[in-house]
Image (tube, rainbow, N blue to C red):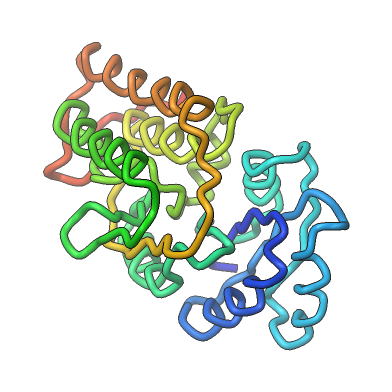
Amino acid sequence: MRLSIVMPVYNEGEIIPETVKRIHEQVKTPFELLIVYDMEGDTTVDAVKKIRNKYKSAKLVKNIYGRGALNAIKTGFTKAKGDAVCVMMADLTDDPQTLNEMMRKFDAGFDIVSGSRYMPGGKQIGGPFLKQLMSKTAGISLHFLAGIPTWDPTNSFRLYSSRFLKKAKIESNGGFELGIELTVKAYFGGYKVTEVPTTWDYLSKESRFLLKKWLPKYLKWYLWALEKRLQGYPISSLRETSSLKKSVK
């Protein structure tokens, strides 16, 4: 198995058939789609059961670490069989076609490939303005101040090599701050990090981002990266990769 797509879900019964259909139509690499749910009553479960005979790569996976998106993603990482593992949302905010370019970067030797809204060619459609402003500011500043080789370190839509995930220690305890945690740890741990442009479509979708709740969790890893830079870790963004060979801690 070359690619595992990990998809945390919460009552996505209305949209999941279209999401699965588009992934199968647009992703060229052979893959397994791990749809990770918390409870049997989730509307996603019955919807997937109705279509999985047609889309046999779609697999329902019960969250084994406790409820919530973070534990669903961790469950997906544990169950994934692919050499590359991509976290993708179920509501089509993420563009499945981006996975093809992500896999090209993976095949070129990169361990982290970020779907980037803020690099040339990328864009975001809709979404809370304040959240977008803060995310973009964080990406720009981390790129220049800490050397992180992506303009969009907060986007959860990213691909990881299984060799990195097997060694990475996950410390996040909230949710989608996991993306920035793993990205900065990979970069300062000597793994190769890059990005590809993607379109993030948030039109007509309800935001589940609670600023007061999530901001401190993102800020923790933002400051962690700046601290590593101040400790003397070199900026290597122009080469898209870190030159260090230390283990992720």
Q: Is residue 192 visible?
A: no
| Res. 221 image quadrant | top left
Q: Is residue 158 above or below residue 144?
A: below
Q: Residue at x 77, y 74 (%)?
A: 47
Q: What x and y, as percent, mark residue 154? A: 38, 41
Q: What x and y, as percent, mark residue 65? A: 76, 37
Quadrant (top left/top right/bottom left/bottom right) for the N terminus: bottom right
Query: Is 95 left or right of 109, judged from the image as shown?
Result: right
Furthest residue in direction right, as rendered: 40
Q: Residue at x 23, y 36 (%)?
A: 137
| Res. 229 image quadrant | top left
Q: Is residue 19 above or below residue 87?
A: below
Q: What x and y, as percent, mark residue 90? A: 58, 63
Q: Is residue 180 visible?
A: yes
Query: Is 140 left or right of 98, judged from the image as shown?
Result: left
Q: Residue at x 41, y 36 (%)?
A: 180
The mark tally for this picture is: 0
Q: Residue at x 54, y 58 (%)?
A: 89
Q: What x and y, as percent, mark residue 242? A: 25, 36
Q: Is residue 227 above or below residue 128?
A: above
